[in-house]
Every structure is written in structure tokens, then in C-alpha cells.
Amino acid sequence: MASQRQVAAARRNVKKAQAGARSKRSIANLPAKTRTALGKQGAAVAARKRTGSKGPATRAELYEQAKRRDIRGRSKMGRDELARALGRG
């Protein structure tokens, strides 16, 4: 039988492990909505690679265009959002 000290130490270890797992930013620990969005974004990237893209392909290029057109919130936007904001699909 485990002593009270051993039980307390085991509880602490479990809590530490749980906290570590929660803080780790792996896809499994992200909210379902975020995982879905990442999957869709990955599928879009794969489709662009297969078919070739039209116009600026990188986020950096789209960001520069958004900067020139002074689109608000551009620094927080991803590639698809920048393309939409610029009216490219």
C-alpha cells in the first residue's frame, strides 16, 4: 500500500503531466473549429500545388498588395483571407 506522501507525489506528477499536455500546441489539443480550418487550408495548398496558382501565390506577396491598398487587419490575416480581402477569390 502506498503511503500518503507517495499518493500526494503521484497526484502532483499527474497534474504536471496534464498541464504539460494542455500547454503543448499540437493539432490534437486545438479546438475542433481550428483543426477544421487548418485541414481546409492544407487541402487548398495541396490543390494549388497540383493545379498551379493564378497570380501571387505567397502570403507575403498578398500582404504587400494589401499594405499598398491599406487594408485594415492585414497583419492578422492568412493567405486566403488576404486573397478574399483583395477580391481574388
Image (cartoon, rainbow, N blue to C red):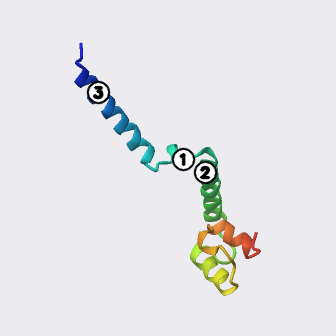
Taking depth in this image into account, of 60 and 69 the one nearest to the observer is 69
Q: Are marks 3 and 2 in contact (CB under 8 Å)?
A: no
| Residue farthest toward the front in the current orientation of the protein | 4
Q: Position of residue 67 (x, y in %)?
A: 64, 83
- Whether residue 71 sits left or right of residue 10 in the image: it is right
Judge whether 67 appears above or below 39 on screen. below
Q: Residue at x 77, y 74 (%)?
A: 87
Marks 3/2: CA distance?
36 Å
- How many neighbours does mark 2 have within 10 angstroms: few (below 14), some (14-19), or many (20 or more)? few
- Residues at circles 2 and 1 in contact by the CB criterion of under 8 Å: yes
Element at label 3: helix
Question: Considering only vertical position in the picture, is 59 above or below 22?
Answer: below
Residue 39, above or below 70: above
| Crowd around label 1: few <14 · some 14–19 · many ≥20 (10 Å) | few
Q: Which residue is mark 3?
A: 8
Query: Which amino acid lies under the numbered mark 2 shown in the image of this protein?
Result: Thr
Image coordinates for residue 70, horizontal then vertical, percent: 68, 83
Q: Nearer the viewer, mark 3 or mark 2?
A: 3
Q: Which mark is residue 34?
A: 2
Q: Quadrant of residue 79?
A: bottom right
- Left or right of 6? Residue 78 is right
Q: Residue at x 62, y 67 (%)?
A: 78
Q: Earlier in the sequence, mark 3 or mark 2?
A: 3
Q: Amino acid at mark 3?
A: Ala
| Name of the residue lying farthest toward the top | 1
Left or right: 10 with respect to 64? left
Numbered disc 2: secondary structure: helix
Instruction: Identify the residue under disc 1.
Output: 30
